Structures are given as C-alpha cells and as structure tokens.
Image: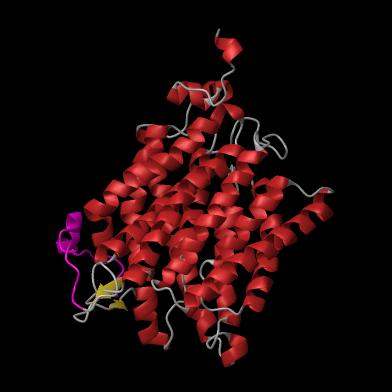
Amino acid sequence: MDQGNTAFLLIAAALVLLMTPGLAFFYGGLVKAKSVISMMMMSFGAIGLIGVLWAIYGYAIAFPGAEGTIFPWSIDSGAIFLSNLLEVPEGAAYPPLAFVAFQATFAIITVALVSGAIADRAKFGAWMVFAGIWATVVYFPVASWVFNFGLAEDGSFSYGGWLTHGLQDVFGSGVIDFAGGTAVHINAGAAALALALVLGKRVGFAKGAHVPHNPPFVLLGAGLLWFGWFGFNAGSELAADGTAALAFVNTIVAPAAALLAWLVVEKIKDGKPTSVGAASGAVAGLVAITPACGSLTPGWAILLGILAGAICALAIDLKFKLGFDDSLDVVGIHLVGGLIGTLYLGFFANGTGLINSGSLTQLLVQAIAAFSVMIYSFVLAFVIGFLIEKTMGFRIKNEDEIAGVDTVVHGEEGYVLADAKA
C-alpha cells in the first residue's frame, strides 16, 4: 500500500467535504435574510442524509464492480454497509475505504447543489425526502455510469460504467469526465431545473426583485468552494502524480479566467462589476474545468474559463426570458457550465479532441454522455418532485414565504440583535 497516495486521497476527501459547508455560505449569502438558515440547512441536511445512505447502499450502487457493469443500473450486494471493503487487497495503492470516503463527498455535494434552485420557498422535510430518493435513483446510478471502478485481483481499479467502458467498446473512446462534469454538475443542474418548474416562481419573482442579502457570505463560500475544489479535481487522479499537478494548475487558471470574463460581461451589460459576479464567475470556471482538468493544457484551460465565465454570465438571465425561477442560478452556472466543459473536450482534449485528432468521435461521445445524464436526471427529478408536491407538499405557503422560511420552518433567525431580545 502506498501511504503517500493514501494520505493524498484522504486529504482530498476532506477538502471535498468542506465544499458543502462552503456551498452553504455561498447559497446562504445569495438568499434574503429571512431564508439564510433554511438555505444553509439544506446543505447540512444533505451531509447527514447522503453520508448515511452512501455507507448503507449508495456505494454498492455507484461502484458495483468491474464485471457486468456496463448496464445502466446494478448493485454489489456484498458492498451493502461496506461489508466487503474492510480489508486492503494485496498490491492495492490505498485502502478501498479511502476511495469510499472520497466518493461519498461527491455524492453529498451533488445533492446539495440542487437545493439552490428552490431557495426561499421549500419545506425542509420535503427537501430531505427528495434528496434521499433522487440520490438513490439518479445520482448513485449515474455515478456508476461515469465513475464506476471495479477492483481487480491485483488490487487495481478498472473502469466499468457504460459511459466509459460501454462507449469505448462502441466508438473506440469513452467519455472524458475527470471529476464530474456530467455526474455532478449536469446531473445537479438538470434536477435543479426540474424542481424549479415543479415548485414554481417565488412571490414577486422579477429581475432585480430578489437581491443577495450578504455578499461577504457569498465571497466566503466561493473561497471555500475553490479551496475544496483542489481536492475535487486533483484528488480525482487518485494519486499524487503529474496528472494531479496538471489538474491542480488548471483548477487555478480556468476559474481565474472565468472570474475576469464574468466581470467584463457584467460591466458591459449592467455597468458595474460586482463581488457576487466575481464569486459566480469563479464557480462557473470551476464547474467547466471539472470534467476537463486532467485533459487540457493550461492554455486551453484558460480559454475554457473565459468561455464559461462569459457564457454563464449571460445564461443566468435565461430564467427571466423563459419564465422559470431557478433561485440561485444552478441551471445557468452548473448545467450550462457543465455542458460547456464536457463538450469543450470534444474539441480540445489532449490526444482525442478534434484539433489534435481530426476526428469528431470524442465530441460525439461527450455529447451522448452529457445529454443522457441531463435527460435522465431532469425526467426523474421532475417526477419525484411532482409526487412529493402532490402528496406531502414541497412548497411552503405564500404567506409563510413572505414572513420568512427560517422562523416558519426552523424556528430560528439568521440574525438576532441582542437589544431586540432584551
């Protein structure tokens, strides 16, 4: 066992787990002051629920083994409660449980991302029900399509998902998704769009009607996300090597370029560059570089960041033009950014992209993966959300939304002045 790689993977897992509290701050600062507790609790609720489900059966669905796993849905019964993963196989680079922990944090952050689309108006209990069902029937299977590894007899891991191994058999090239452009960002963005449609618009929904109540929270959250994202991207190499270093550098330059591009677009479009725009631009760049961080030179990563920052800065206005209330721009940043980063690889991926190979095969494979995940996630998220809304109810009452979700749902306030309570 390589203790260096083991330490690297465990540290990366801790960094990725930190991303979810970072997301809580990022989202919490974007909502109104009366909703900050509700918004942050959705992220922390995801940590609790998905962390437990992952150990019980999530890992068993997402990583059912190398044999016979090119099909869209299967399960390794021996991995229920992680029972067959306690021993370290001879020759393994790291303990299987280190990989389990790393992938658990991916499941948690993906579910938490969806919550941004329903800010200010969702019941916490209904959100938790949705999170558990969606993770079970959408995230866990989709993770197996993209990330699934099977543990070989020599202790090494080999790909087995249908978007990797399956497309490789058909087209000679599997999807390139280094750290989760499809399984995490497109997946979460599509589900967010579905929930936004199910729950409908907030009271008074209009451009400029809902402004972030705490930009410093947004910047803090973005900083924590960026810090944790080094574990997300570089850690996905599963080894402290040159590819991890490349992913690390690209995780610096792409979001940096996206931040600048967003601010330029914002200045041209609205007249002023904002702190929230800087934070959102950085996150858009992080999203776009996620699938591509190990397969692009830094120069192409900078170009990707510029494109993602500029396009996502424009895409967030789609909700006003198309009439859906994606409260915190999960669609405009994560779905659009994930699509940009995933499809970009079809043109610029080292070795297999169009400009390097002269072939459109990689672009075709990337498109199949991106749109398969998007459609699957959207349809099931819509059905799950619709059924919850029609049974236990997903959205709070309009009068409760106006009064404030925090006091109605959680009995707490985000900001309490001591003098007011005296």
Depth check, front residue: 104 or 410: 104
Q: Residue furthest top?
A: 422
Depth check, front residue: 262 or 324: 262
Q: Is residue 242 left or right of residue 135?
A: right
Q: Residue furthest bottom?
A: 358
Could you tell me which residue is drawn at 27 percent across and 59 percent down? Answer: 59
Q: Is residue 134 left or right of residue 409?
A: left
Image coordinates for residue 22, horizontal then vertical, percent: 52, 46
Q: Is residue 75 magenta?
A: yes
The span picked out in magenta is 70-90
Image coordinates for residue 284, horizontal then vertical, percent: 61, 58
Q: Residue furthest front?
A: 3
Image coordinates for residue 36, horizontal then vertical, percent: 54, 32
Quadrant of the rendered structure where residue 123 is?
Answer: top left
Secondary structure mainly formed by the magenta segment: loop
- Which quadrant of the rendered structure holds the C terminus? top right
Quadrant of the rendered structure where residue 148 is?
Answer: bottom left
